[in-house]
Structure formats: C-alpha cells, structure tokens
Amino acid sequence: MSSDLLAGLNPAQREAVTTVKGPVLVLAGPGSGKTRVLAHRVAYLLRVAGAHPRSVMAVTFTNKAAGEMRERINKLLGEAVPVSSGWKGLTIGTFHSICARILRAEAGPAGLNPNYVIYDDGEQLSAIRSALKDLKIDEKMYRPEAMRAAISKAKNELVKPENFATTTYYEEIARRVYARYEQILKANGALDFDDLLCRVTWLFKEQPDVLARYQDRYEYLLVDEFQDTNSAQYEMVCMLAGRTRNLFAVGDEDQSIYGFRGADYRNVLRFREDFPDARVILLEQNYRSTQLILDAANAVIARNIKRTPKHLRTDRGAGAQVILHEAYDETDEAQFVVNTIQRLVGSGEIRLSDVAIMYRTNAQSRSLEDAFVARGVPYRLIGGTRFYQRKEIKDALAYLRLVHNPADNVSLMRVINVPPRAIGDKTISALAAWSGEQGVSMTGGLALVAGDLASPVLEGYRAEGGKPGKPPQHPFGTAANKALVAFYRLLKGWLDVKDGLTVSQLLEKITEQAGYATWLRDGTEEGEDRWENLQELSSVAAHYDDFPPELRLTAFLEEVALVSDQDELAEQDERVTLLTVHTAKGLEFPVVFLVGLEENVFPHSRSMEDPDQMEEERRLMYVGVTRAKDRLYLVRAFRRMLWGRSEINEPSRFLRDVAAAQGGTMGMSPVRGAPSRTAGMMDGARSGGWGYEPRDRRRAADDEDSWGGASRRSRPDEKSSLYGGTGGSRSWMPKPAPPQPPKKAERPAREPQFKPGDRVDHGLFGQGIVLKSEVTADDEEVTVAFQGKGTKTLLAGFAKLRKAPR
DNA sequence: ACAGGCCTGGTTTTT
DNA sequence: CCAGGCCTGT
C-alpha cells in the first residue's frame, strides 16, 4: 500500500515523506520536488500512518498551491479526501485563509464581530487617514503609507500599541496613529491582513484553552515556504505543534523574498534551535533546470554571505546556452522578446504557454504589453491592475460588505455617493462626526436621521439609552437630510432581504436599485468593459449559491479578500505570461525571459544602500533564474524611460556575476555615454545585424569559450548579446568592448571632477548645483539641479559641463 | 454638489 | 508617466 506512495521518490524525498513523528526540517532547493513531497507526505499520513484528515493542517503560500495540493492528494489516494469547509476534513490553505477561518469560528473568544470584514491596503489607508484626521495630525508630515508600514511591521512582530516602543517623536506619532487605527477597525468590525495572523497568535497566547483545542485537533502540521514566515506565523506554528511536535517545515533560505512584509528567513535557523532534535533533510537534486541554468543561478546566489552553501545537481545535462541580450531601450527590449518568442514558436520548438517574461516591478510590463499587442501575440498579465483592484469591483464589494456588516464605515463612505446622489464630502464628514458623537456607526447615524429607531443597526445605541422614541437633533439641512434618508431606505431594503437571496441575486439587486448599473454603462466602451467585469464578479459569486444561506456572503467576501495574483494563474490557453519575479515564485516555465537587468531596476534602487536588502535582491534574482527549465534569456536595456525621464543604468551586477561564472568577458558596460543619436549607429542591426562582422570574428578569436562564442553559434537575433547588439537589437556601440576582467568592472578608479554642492554651467540649462556625481566607465555622470529647469542627469563630457565660479 | 483642469509628488516587491 | 489631491468655475 505504501509502496505506490513512495514510488518515484529519491531517498531524501522518501525520508521526508515517511518521517512521521517529531520535527522535520526540509531544506529544499529550487525544483527539488518539494511540492511533490508535501502531497505524498499528506497522503502517507492518511493512508499509512492512519491519521484522520481533520488532524492534518497543511499551510501553503498561495490559494492556488493549496488547490493543487488537494488535487494531488486526491489523485494519490484515488479518492476525494474531505476538505475542511466546515470543520471535518483536511485543512489546506494559506496562513491568511486558515486564520480567517479560525477567527470566524473563535469570534467570541477573540473578541471580534463574527461578520468582520477584511480591509485591503486601500481600505487600510482610508482608516489610517481617518485616524490621522481624528488626531489632527498632518498627512503631509506623517504619510499614511509610512504609518501603514509602521503598523504592519508592529503587527508582524506581534507588538500592540501599548507595547510600541518609541524613541523618537515620529515613533510616538506612529504609536498614537496605531492605537487610534485599532479603535477604528474595531468600531467598523474590520481586520487588516496582518490582523488575521497576529490575532490568532494572540488568541493562542492569551487563551490556553482555545490553543489546547487546536493543538488536540491538529496532530500533524506541514508548512511550505518556511523561509517566508514572519514572527507571528512562526510563533503560531510553534504553539500549534506544541503538544505533538509533529511539525514538518519545508523551505529554502535562498528563496526568501518577502522580507519587506516581515518574513524572516532566519526562522529556518530558529527552527533548528527551537527543535534541536529536528531531523534535517536536504533536497539537492534538481529536476527542473538544465545544468547551465543552474550554473547561472549558482553564480548569482553564491555571492550572498548570509547563507549555507549548497550543491544543486541536475541530471538534465548542460542544455542550451543561457542567452544574454543587450537592447537599446525598453521598446527594443520588448521587440527582442517578441521576436525571439515568435521564432521559437514558429519553429515548433515551444508553445506560447511555455514562456514567461519576468521583471522586477509591475511598471515594466507596459512596454512589453505594447509590443505583444502590436504584434498580435496573446499574453496574460499577472498582477498589475488586478481584477479585484478595479474600481467597479471594489464598489460592488463595498456594497456587499456594507450589507454584510453595516458598521463598516469605510465601505459606507466608499459607496454612499457612488453613483452621485447629492451627498457631498461635507455631508459625509458631518455624518461621520455626528454618528461618532451619538456612539453609533454611520449606518446607525443614518437610521437616526431617518427616525428608524427600531433598526437593528442601532442595537448598542438603545442599550445605552438615548431618549426612547425620540431621535436626537441632527445637524443636516433639508436637502442633505432627504438624500441621506433616501440612501438609508435603499440600504435598509437590502438588509431586509439579504438572507433570502444568493450572493449574485443580492449583487444584482443592489447594482440595479442603487442605479449603479445604469451609471456604469454610460455608453462608452469602457463602461461596457466595467459592466462585464461586474458580470464576472457575479459569476464568481454564483459558486457560493449552494452554501448554507448564513454562510454564503461570509464565504464569498472572505475568498475575494484573500485571493492573490498567483491564484489567477490558470494555465488554460495559449498565451505567454507576464509577471513579476515575486509572483513567479513556486512556478516553472520551459522558457524564461528576465528583463530589465540593470542597476537600479534589478537590483532595485531602493535596495542599493542596505547589504541585507541587496542580499534579498540577489535571492530574488536566484528565484527568477531557477524558474527556467530549458531556456533562459537575460536581457538588459542600455537606456530606459523611468519616471518619465530617460535613464541610463549600468548593467545589473547579477548579469556580470553570471557572465563571470561562464568564464568569459562581457563587453557590456562600455556602451556608456555612447550618444544614441549618432547617425547610422542603429542601422546594420536592423537588417540582421551583421554590420560589425569583423569585430565578431576578432572577438571569437579572443575568447573562444566566452558566452559571446556560445551565443554566436545561435541564431542571428539572439547572438548579439555581448557586444552591444549586433543582432536583432540595434547596435549602438561604435567599437567593441575593451576586454575587461569582470571582477574589477565594478567601478573604474578615477577621481570625479564634480562633487555635490559644486556650481556648474551648462550651455542649455544655465547654472545649477550638483547633487550627485558618479564616475563611469569613460565619463562622469552628474546629477544637477538647474534653476527653473529641474533636475537632470548628464554625462559631464558629453554635456560639456563646466565648473562655475562660486 | 460636482465637473474639469492644473499641479504636485511618488513609484518595489504582496497575502 | 500616472494618479490623486486641490482649486476653480458652474
């Protein structure tokens, strides 16, 4: 019986599957089959070790991963294992979704509104803005985003407002905002994402009897992507496993890329300290990538100091050369990508769905999309403007949430005047303030204005004893009053019928009666698009029609609050995939393009100062590279539009690391300062790029084994990589790269002519002050603030910059 | 109350 | 470059 569950597993994987008792830590390199191990282990627990499904909890990183694991387990067992939708079956899900369910079940002990709503960061920011307003704090000085970051960090570290340590005045403000924000969430019956985690952890810490129930239930715990757990998650897991100690953690320090949201790869080390008897299993056999791809990955990650060296192996052989390509700018970069894809697909080697294009930031997708649209290549974009971020979807959801939980002021404020019903900002603020004074939610305030004292939304109010039968004096004029009462009637109508309708029926009723549908469909194409999105939301809602009536809306709202980008990744049709490297985690593609490999883009400029953050960038690059199975393209652009300005960035250090490991020199940086406008420079390349043939030959002789040599063997439009694009890319480089040992390529030792503070003269822009200056390969790049002309970055020699007398 | 236009300012990554 | 905030005029 057990043999089929172990068939096809290597010895290390087998050990991971069958070590049932006690703590186990699996250090799993990319492509080492950890997903497989997890599924087999669950199946093994159920089938061989005799575990009951309800005693197993498996935590995945995305909802999609949870779904896949469920399917795999069912397949392995040849039957459908009941899954916990109530509290009977197997528990598989993300931390967030599992916690949401626990909090729903434990609303009483946790002191929560059982109909709590989950705020995304937009709504979180609204709540923070209200907090700032209440505290009369200037938004300019204390930015809501910064406050959100501070609050989130605190919650991830399980710090409550009363324990929030403050050493600066700024932190003191943050502490007060945090405290007020918590009050607002509570009043609105809302939780934010971080709450889902830390509330459960607090609940377990503070109420041992509750914890004991969960400890007794969950005898087997499995946690995937352990390197991306934060403190709250780590503590939660340890507490849950406190009784049985059957904790199975899978992770890879090298793939920890969520530090910015509190994840700490050191939890892997902490695990070893907290469970000194843990069995540690290494999965080093890679089943995904070719050797050359692994070599590239290794070249990148090996430079991190804070890691344990590993030895990834593959049986797949060397494989195709990793291709490096230099494009002129982001448009050209996109051209190269599309060209290459069309060629590979045209030759029948691959299908569109085999291809992923990955980038550091979402903003980079735009130029790629343009190229795909122009060439008629179907693509799907993951992330970006996500479905659930669209205005019409958020509006519709806000309506539903308000009906679900009338105390939710943030949702109310979102929809009270959408479509416009003559309730302006002034009226809304007045309603918020006055309702607060009366000690009721804004919906409660509306009920008071409408004189509906029997309304259930006023429950708390009556208990505290306003004068019975008489609504209090309100500050609204006749016009505002009328509008508010009209809205209240609308809302009341929905509250009365919500229990008898399915979610899609309710949604239809609301959009209809609120006039939202007609308002949206204003005759424009965009209006129709938005309407269609709404229809799509409705069809998602239809999945919940079969749920028990009291659960329908709850379950639906919970799901839509917790969907992630990756969850959209159904690989139905023939399209290429565009996604950030972050969302690519856990996925694999036969063909991967990593684009935008420039300093300040990838690695991101925000990570330049801090070595720890730079290590995270490196891990991110490592994740990107290791997504590729067969073919990997590393692409960089000489210049790029960034923030509406054209920027010239050095090639990414990661590119250099990869090249160095391949033993060749890479003439990548010398294009620096080559004025792109020079006539004729781009010509030869256009027609196949053999305009510089002699140089190519000479290079071939120079270093036979360099990547240049390798890529030269490949087809014309990908062979250009190293020498400034003799291929499909335009060639902007007037002369071949001086061979340069990659190691010392970091920065030429030359004294800068300009330093910050210097006054300079420019022929066109006049006088300015130097902000920053960096020596480059053959020039000096100076950032200057010009009076009345803004800040420009110039190449000193090219721009003929002169020092001006002080 | 609201539409439209100007300006500023901010841009990593996401459950 | 873009969104969102702010101001103006209706």
Image: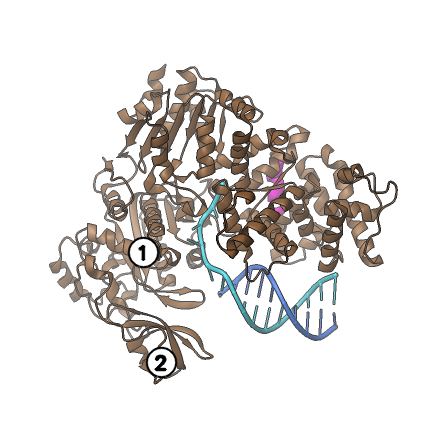
Chain colours: A brown, B cyan, C blue
Residue at image location 57% in from the left, 40% down from the top: A560
Report if residue A360 lies within the magenta region.
Answer: no
Task: Report if residue A79 is visible in the image.
Answer: yes
Q: What percent of the width, then of the height, locates residue A506?
A: 70, 39
Task: Please give the range of residues in magenta.
Answer: A532-542
Amino acid residing under circle 1: Val
Residue at image location 39% in from the left, 35% down from the top: A226
* Image quadrant containing the N terminus of chain A: top left
* Image quadrant containing the C terminus of chain A: bottom left
Q: Which residue is mark 1?
A: A635
Q: Is residue A390 above or below residue A404?
A: below
- Secondary structure state at the residue bearing disc 2: strand
Q: Is residue A497 above or below residue A392?
A: above
Direction right: furthest residue? A469
Report if residue A539 lies within the magenta region.
Answer: yes
Q: Is residue A58 above or below residue A626?
A: above
Q: What percent of the width, then of the height, locates residue A394?
A: 61, 48
Mark 1 vs mark 2: give the one in front.
2
Amino acid residing under circle 2: Val
The CA span between labels 1 and 2 is 36 Å
Where, by quadrant of the figure, is residue A137 drawn? bottom right
Q: What percent of the width, then of the height, locates residue A111?
A: 63, 34
The disc label shown at residue A760, or none:
2
Q: What percent of the width, then of the height, locates residue A803?
A: 32, 82
For the stretch drawn in magenta, the main secondary structure is helix
Where, by quadrant of the figure, is residue A672 drawn? bottom left
Please state the chain letter of the residue tagged with numbered disc 2 in the rendered image: A
Where, by quadrant of the figure, is residue C8 drawn? bottom right
Residue at image location 41% in from the left, 19% down from the top: A45
Front residue of this view, candidates A785 and A465: A465
The disc label shown at residue A199, or none:
none
